[in-house]
Amino acid sequence: MAIIYQIYPLSFLDTNKDGIGDIKGIIKKLKYLEELGAEYIWITPIFKSPMEDNGYDISNYYDVNPIFGTKEDLKELIDTAKKHNIKIILDLVLNHTSTEHDWFIKASKDVNSKYHDYYIWSENPPQIDSYFGGSAWEYVPSVKKYYLHMFSTGQADLNWKNEKLREELFEMINYYIDLGAGGFRLDVLDLIGKDLENNNLYDRELLLKYLKELNEKCFKGKDIFTVGEMNLPLEKAHYLSKNEILTTVFQFNHIALDEVAGKGKWELKKLELNDLKEVLNNIQQVYQKGGTPSLFWSNHDQPRALGRYLNLDYRYYGQTMLFMLMYLQKGHIFIYQGEEFGMSGLGLVDIDKYKDVEALNYYNIATKTKSKESVLRSLAVKARDHARTPMQWNNTKNAGFSKGKPWMEVNANYTEVNFEKDYNSDKSIYKFLKKLLEIRQNNTTFDKGLFKLVVLGPHIFAYERVLDDNYLIVCNFSDKKQPIIDLKGEIILNNYDSLDNQLKPYQALLIKRG
Ligand code: NOJ
């Protein structure tokens, strides 16, 4: 089971004072990441891009975006990381390219160009909504057709039915494998199986065919870690991992529990612990039959769990409890930058603090029918910006992230919440996580053992892991004390100094029972 640390390069560490994090900044922190226990680093896209969607709009797969550095920097990162026993996972966007990609420029000038068919066009498009709001079709007068963009207008969807296109993508992936990449995170991979001729945006058979081909042509027989971002039924995702078509899959059911089902991401509701138990338990049960799920709370699209679900007055206890709840289950561990010392989101702020195209689109569309206050409340909980603020390394200017003007405002709490302060405190989240990861890596029960949910109370998330050893994990998911029955066994890890006859707010325990 792997430990993966996710880096959002724009906000990680700026070494050339332009206010934007860079590859050299990542190289500087490799020792830090090795010490924490990271075996892989997943870096969100660093390829050439006009940055309409912060790099998920690639205009040249073979070039590094100069704001992050050069191809040489990337090579240096891969090679230096190896010396720290870390492999680099690159982020591949295979569902769409930027409309500034050479392919699209040619495709949109000439219907007879071979590139025209690399994209999805229609003269009379069916109604499809973009994930970022508004229609998913955009008209191009020069060819008198609309192209499909499931995300922003600058992100044109690729036509995977075109064999030549698939070959070009596979060739590019193999180029990065030859350069030394240790793996790939594959963006919205569930969207590539489109069959618009038959009005099917999500053709699962077609998808499986492409995934098998991708595996065959690029990954099979190689030591390459792959994680597909895919909104699929649990059994289908499990099939992909179990059959090693992908190493693992990101699924989002457990972090969509604070939204009203079927109403999109902005319609908020309170997270119910029972729902979380049900979703996570289902995943664990399915993966008892083989394959490995992914374990994560946040990423660059998912606001940090700490302030989203928990009371920030208990930062240390809340964050360490979240780690215990998630990371002792079966699965690959994904840590999102800043979680290791308890960073949180911006909270309720005005619209001028937001940068993300999704948040701005939502605001513009939603304020036509809803009050500004309610729109800002949804944004405060769900906008991606809250996960994207610069890393808070220390309490110097700009939290030590940059000596220039940061591309995005640093969270004002940085004098209180930063790595240096955490590391030097008696109650260090970073040190707790490091210890947890060590325990986990030194005990196969957490990889291979059975997972059994244990009922201890409505506010307690508890489970057993059983193989040669028997472990009980108990997490108080509330900021109130919770009564418990006598918990017998040896306490291996406790985020408080003691255990009374009640669990303290967000108290979490790992108990060995035999
Ligand atoms: C998922 C990525 O994580 C997100 O940041 C991006 O906006 C969309 N895919 C579109 O590429």
Image (cartoon, helix red, strand yellow):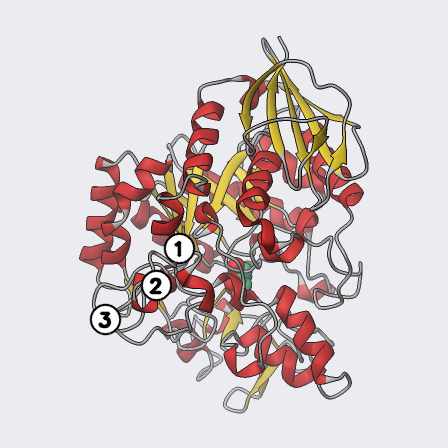
SS state under label 3: loop
Q: Which mark is residue 381?
A: none
The amino acid sitting under disc 3 is Lys
Residue 326 locus on image (x, y percent):
60, 37
Mark 2 touches mark 1? (CB < 8 Å): yes
**Separation of residues labelled 1 and 3 (CA atoms):** 20 Å
Q: Residue at position x 53%, y 65% from top?
A: 386
Query: Where, quadrant-wise, is the C terminus in this rendering?
Result: top right
**Separation of residues labelled 2 and 1 (CA atoms):** 7 Å
SS state under label 1: loop
The amino acid sitting under disc 1 is Asn
Mark 1 touches mark 3? (CB < 8 Å): no
Q: Which mark is residue 418?
A: 1
Tell me which label, 3 or 2, sits earlier in the chain: 3
Establish if 353 lies above or below 223.
below
Q: Residue at position x 37%, y 74% from top?
A: 407
Establish if 82 lies above or below 228.
above
SS state under label 2: helix
